Image (cartoon, helix red, strand yellow):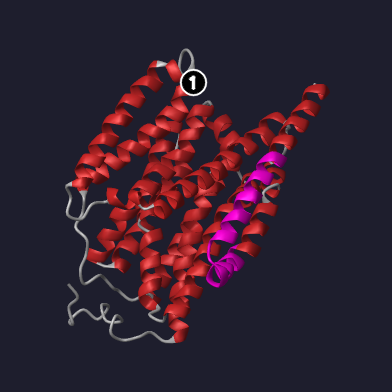
Amino acid sequence: MDTPTDPHVKHQNEPLSLRRRWAVLAICASALFLVGLDTTIVTVALPHISDGLSVGDARMAWVVDAYTVPFASLLITAGALADRFGRRRVFRTGLVIFGLASLACAVAPSAELLITARIVQGTGASMLTPVALAIVVNAMPDPRERARAIGVWGAMFGMSMAAGPVTGGLLVTAFDWRAVFWMNGPLVLTTLLLVSLVVPESRSTRPRHLDIPGQVLLILILATTVMILIEGPSATGTWWTSPTTLTGCVILLLTAAGFHHVEKRRREPLVDPELFRIPAFTGAIISAIVVFAGFSLTLLSTTLLLQNTLGWSPVATGAATLPMAAGVLVFAPLSGRVVGDSGPRVPLLAAGACLVLGGVLLLVFTVATQGRASRSC
């Protein structure tokens, strides 16, 4: 509960100035950019990490997913912690964890330690995205100003994920793969200083209760799913009949059933199962999963194809994603305006058509370039 003796917990009743509100947005958006950047920046560096640590493709896939699994699964709990203990406090804690884990990644002598550090890095990142958004929403009580801020927010995250491969390519070429993690140090320190100077403390007057059993089961569900997808193809025998896949599927079914059982009986569940009875909610969740899975797989497979098969440099590989970054920069702000004017149907139909067209063009490009590569050998 907010106390009047705490000088930092005050702006819920005292509006911030216009300049300070947008300064808060800029600081929180920069942290979001850092989180999104680290989701994809490592992709271009994977072939060099593989050579430097002498490991195969399966371990390299874990370098990517060891970050995204804790990041995705801890978002709701991080938001609940921020509502209870203070958003600025949790935000700064997340920055410290993220920064220290980045330094651990930069000096990791083995793939196992790198993967462990990436897990910690993803945990820190999970404290940044939802908490930063809550800080922005709390700082901007006017609905129209808040809508503009959230539009900037969404564009920043999309730009960060698209800019990751370009930034990674430049750093790997200029230095080595460890530079993609070293760069986080000064950025985190700068953000920490600005947060301390500009961002006021705030918390919810009615914080959610933590759902520890549900959180543990959700982590197991996501980790098991990723394990099946990564380790299954490299196991002995056919992927869908290998012991790794079959064991993983049994664990996944049991944990999913346990998660549903636990959440149905919680007064404040981590994920309310009743929400999935709403077609719009379920459709949006499925669409988001498909889009982000396709985005991540496209980046990973394209990077391996261009560098390992076609011999492209890291800079050229990163530059190949520039059209995607430009598309996000141009259309992310426009989509929010179109949704506000005419609803989500037209943007969703246009997005689906663009995804299909882009997938077909990538497939044609892949077949053509692989054919030329094989003829040149």
Relative to 274, 243 lies left or right = right
Q: Position of residue 269 (x, y in %)?
A: 23, 52
Residue 93 falls in which quadrant of the image?
Answer: bottom left
| Location of residue 210 with respect to 361 vertically, above or below | below
Amino acid type indicated by mark 1: Ser
The answer to whether residue 341 is magenta is yes
176 and 304: which one is in front?
Answer: 304
Q: Position of residue 358 (x, y in %)?
A: 68, 45
**SS for tag 1?**
helix
Who's the residue at 31% across and 30% down the image?
253
Q: Quadrant of the C terminus?
A: top right
Relative to 170, 293 lies left or right = left
35 and 148: which one is in front?
Answer: 148
Who's the residue at 82% across and 22% down the image?
375
Who's the residue at 46% across and 85% down the image?
18
- Which residue lies most toward the right here? 376
- Which residue lies most toward the top here? 237
Residue 261 falls in which quadrant of the image?
Answer: top left
Q: Position of residue 22 (x, y in %)?
A: 47, 78
| Location of residue 271 with respect to 192 vertically, above or below | above
CA neighbours of label 1 inside 10 A, class few (<14), some (14 to 19), many (20+): some
Who's the residue at 31% across and 86% down the image?
14
| Location of residue 197 with respect to 355 vertically, above or below | below
| Residue 252 in view, yes or no | yes
The answer to whether residue 44 is magenta is no
Q: Position of residue 127 (x, y in %)?
A: 35, 57
| Residue highlighted by disc 1 | 234
Relative to 274, 182 lies left or right = right
Residue range in magenta is 332-361
Residue 231 falls in which quadrant of the image?
Answer: top left
139 and 225: which one is in front?
Answer: 225
Q: Quadrant of the N terminus?
A: bottom left
